[in-house]
Amino acid sequence: MAEVQAGRRRRRRRRNEGIVIHDDWAGYSLDLFSYPTHYSGDLDSVIIPHGVIMDRTERLARDIMDDLGDHDIVVLCVLKGGYQFCADLVDQIKALSCSSERTILMRVHFIRLKSYLNDQSTEDLHILGAEDMSFLTGKNVLIVEGIVGTGKTLETLLKHVEAFRPKMIKVAGLLIKRVENRSACVPDYVGFEIPNRFVVGYALDYNEYFRDLNHICVISDSGKKKYKI
Ligand code: IMP
């Protein structure tokens, strides 16, 4: 029993970490991939190619299905950065629901958070479209977020959601950053743990640019200058 519990704890820990991308990983050269030519010179490297994101998302969907199969859930998609991950994750869960005995009934809601200007977090977090979330009371909620940096945004959102007394809250985050003083608040399902660099693509933006890029890339200094406001 103790071994089984230790095994469960190990599995849980791995899910919390995701695939770890180390600080010394320089990423793939952009020349090895296709990407929109309007971003030439604006990116340093591809840190996670689109295909790898899709493969990892497929596995996260299976982990979620293992834990939550046969439940009804409300998916809370955190816009704008989480829209692509949420769409792909929901697609994968739907595919599993069609091909196995177990199934998850999902309803999807969208909320919008904004706390970053250029590449800096601001104290000013806005939650839009979430004033009344009483539809979450007594429900199983899966929050889907694109990236967690310091964790402050997630912490604030969790407090807001908890106030509506859902039955259960789980969080799926595609990326978590290794930042100093990260809040203890980490997603239950993590795609990748990445170095503390500003990344864009796959719906993650820098001042609204780069959402139209499939791979997750590191923005270059000249890219930051070009799109700075
Ligand atoms: P936190 O409060 O520091 O965890 O920041 C989380 C939010 O900051 C995310 O929802 C994103 O909107 C944004 N963010 C943090 N790091 C990045 C990044 O590297 N690229 C794009 N957005 C980021």
Image (cartoon, rainbow, N blue to C red):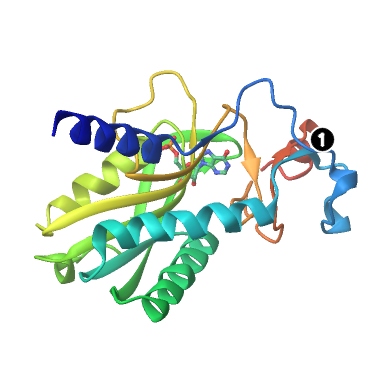
Residue plotted at (28% across, 34% down) = 7
| Residue with the mark numbered 1 | 222
Res. 63 visible in picture: yes
Residue located at (51% from left, 56% from top): 57
Left-right relation of 117 to 37: left
Secondary element type, mark 1 = helix
Which quadrant of the figure contains the C terminus?
A: top right
Pick the residue in front: 174 or 101. Answer: 101
* Quarter of image, res 108: bottom left
Q: Residue at x 45, y 60 (%)?
A: 79
Residue type beneath disc 1: Ser
In the displayed structure, would residue 39 be above or below residue 9? below
Depth check, front residue: 85 or 11:
11
State which quarter of the image contains the N terminus.
top left
Q: Position of residue 138 (x, y in %)?
A: 9, 65
**Closer to the camera in the image, 102 or 30:** 102
- The answer to whether residue 203 is visible is no
From the viewer's perspective, tell me whether residue 178 is left or right of residue 78: right
The residue at the point 25 percent across, 61 percent down is 68
Above or below, 145 against 23 in this view is: below
